Each structure stands twice: as C-alpha cells, then as structure tokens.
Amino acid sequence: MQTVSIQTASKQYDVWIGERVIEEVRFFIQTNFADRTKILVITDETVKKLHLELLLKNLSSLPVIAYTVPAGEKAKTFDVFYACLTYMLEQHLDRKSLVLALGGGAVGDLAGYVAASFMRGIPFIQIPTTILAHDSAVGGKVAINHPLGKNMIGVFNQPEAVFYDTTFITTLPIRELRSGFGEVIKHALISDSAFYRELLCQISDLSKVPLSYWSKILEKGILVKRAIVEKDEMESNVRAFLNFGHTLGHAIEAEMGYGKFTHGEAVVIGMIFALKLSKHHYDLPFSLEEYINWLKQLGYSCDIPGDLEIERLIDRMKQDKKSINGSIRFVLLKEIGYPELVEMDEDVIRKELALFKGGK
C-alpha cells in the first residue's frame, strides 16, 4: 500500500493506493468520524453489482445505507442530483452524516457535489473503482453536466480521504481501461518526458498490465496532480494544465452525447490535436507518428468522429471553462513536461481541425 498526502489551501487528506485498501475504510471512519449519525454510500448500477456488497461487509458495524444512480455520465444530471438530495432528506440524514462515493469519476463528481450541497456541506470520502477516477477523485473538483457543457455546474470540495483499491481494476472492461489510461498519458505528457517514455516502452497491451504496475503508474499520476493542485487549488492559473487534451475532448463528448464516447477516448483525441497545435505554435520536438501508432496499438481511435461538424466543435470549445469572453484557450506543450495555456486564433483552430479531419 502506498500513501500520498495532499495538502491544499483548504484541507489536508491522504490517498491510499493498493490491493484490498477498502479494508481500511472502517478504521478510518471509526477514528475520524465516530460521531456520524448515518453514512450514505452513493454508487451506480454497475458498481453496485460488483463491489457494494464487499464495502457494506467491511462497514457492517456502522450505520450505512446506499443509494444507486445510473452508470456513467447519466448520473451527472440535475434530475439525479435532485433525487440524491431527496433521498437524503427522506432518510433523515443531517449535518453529522457522511457520504461515501463508490464508483468511477461520474459517481465521484456527483457524490462530491451532493455532499457539498446537502445542508450547506457534509464530509465525503472517495472510493474510486476505475482507473479514470485516479484523476477525478483527487483535487476536489466536483460537478454535474449541463446539455451545453460538461462539468459546468459544480464546486471545489476536497474529500476527507481517498481509498484506491487496485483490485477493482480486475473487473474493468478493456474500454474502461483505455478511458482511464488516457488520463495517465496526460499526466505523463504535462510533467515528465521520462514518465512518458516509460509508458511508451512498458505498455503495449492494457489487458496485460499487472496490478503492481498499475499501482506504480497511478501513484505517479496522482503525484503529478498533487504538485499542481497544491499550487493552485481553485484553478486560477497552473491547475488549468490538467486540462491538456480536454478542450477538444469535452467538445467531442458533448457533441457525441454524454456516455456515448468515454471521457478518456475523447481526451486522447483532444491530446493529439493539442500536440498538433503545439507543433504549429511552438515547433514542439515530438514524434506524433510514434505516439499515434502506440495509441492505435492500445486500441484507441485517433480521429475526430466523421459526423461531427467543425463549427459545432468550435462553438462547444467557446463554452469551455478555460475560455474567456468566447476566446478559445488550449493547454499546449512547449516541450514534454512544459505546458502553457495559450489563447488560439479561431481561424487557426478551424484550419487545423479541417486538416485533422482530412479536409472534410
């Protein structure tokens, strides 16, 4: 088991990473939240079948109830958010209650926002079950989606702790492995060329990565995020670097329809485009051909879906959280490990998107 300590301006908490870490949750609650009146586990339909029973077994001596939401991005809607709050009121939760987010990034985002909103805020703990959630569970950004943009309605709300049980990875389908690994690649590209080269050389088949190595690279990814979040908790400057690949990625997700294209798959395409812009803007010394060939070997699609219109994507990017007064800003790389937030000319983006789509 590895432990990473996160110290932001608002809170200090630990992230525990390793096999069977879920067994430590009860001791943590009994030590730090022994006075809790009720503990609510928010999970989704898929994770409920796989992992809820194990968690409840480990918490059998505590006052625990569970609420199930739809799987994936369908959980991050106003209706589901409202339903969670209604259930909490019906079950008489109060300010001495505690929320546990058991699931992937969508459940963590929803549950963290629910916890922040209920009675003006009660504590919550992240128990991620996907690789993707190694990114979303750390740093305190919680939100739900709006039809006009992803994660547009939310707050900063740091968890009390994160318990990352890597045995859950064994239950993930290959598409979820790819989705989560996209964020691992992102952490490498914005932080350290050696980390990127290690991934490139060591991983050729995501289905054959041993748990011990997942633990290693997930810890590295969390350390990258820690270094940035501790400098900029509220995303006023350098935290925006964590959105590398997300400007176009979020636009693709929204245009495809949330849940029809996984977050990581969209971000991978967004990173390819950001690297193309980086070459245009900074003459980035980077082999895109090697990178794309590696991604294809891992099973990623490396092209913008053909039915998505360039003007629609640009409109979506204008609504991105990094955009100011409609000006589109991208996280680009001067070199691997040296990101910059850059306002891009719309005509340049339009031209590069057309080239990316093969002139379509």
Image (cartoon, rainbow, N blue to C red):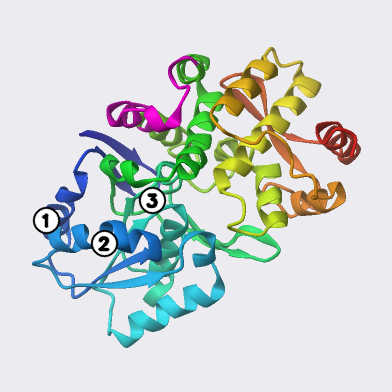
Find the distance from the CA under tag 1 to the CA under tag 3: 21 Å
The residue located at (35%, 84%) in the rendering is: 89
Q: CA distance from mark 3 to mark 2?
A: 30 Å
* Residue placed most toward the observer, 7 or 298: 298
The amino acid beneath tag 3 is Ser
Q: Is residue 326 visible?
A: no
Q: Is residue 193 magenta?
A: no
**Amino acid at the residue labelled 1:** Thr
Q: The C terminus lies in which quarter of the figure?
A: top right
- Secondary structure of the magenta portion, mostly? helix
- Decide: few, some or many residues near mark 2? Use Cα within 10 Å; few <14, some 14-19, many ≥20: many
Disc 3 marks which residue? 10
Q: Which mark is residue 52?
A: 2
Q: Which residue is mark 1?
A: 31
Give the residue displayed 85% in from the left and 46% down from the top: 310
Q: Quadrant of the N terminus?
A: top left
Q: Residues within 10 Å of mark 3 (few under 14, many from 20)?
A: few
Instruction: Point out the stretch of residues depicted in magenta.
Output: 201-218
Q: Which amino acid type is shown beneath numbered disc 2?
A: Leu
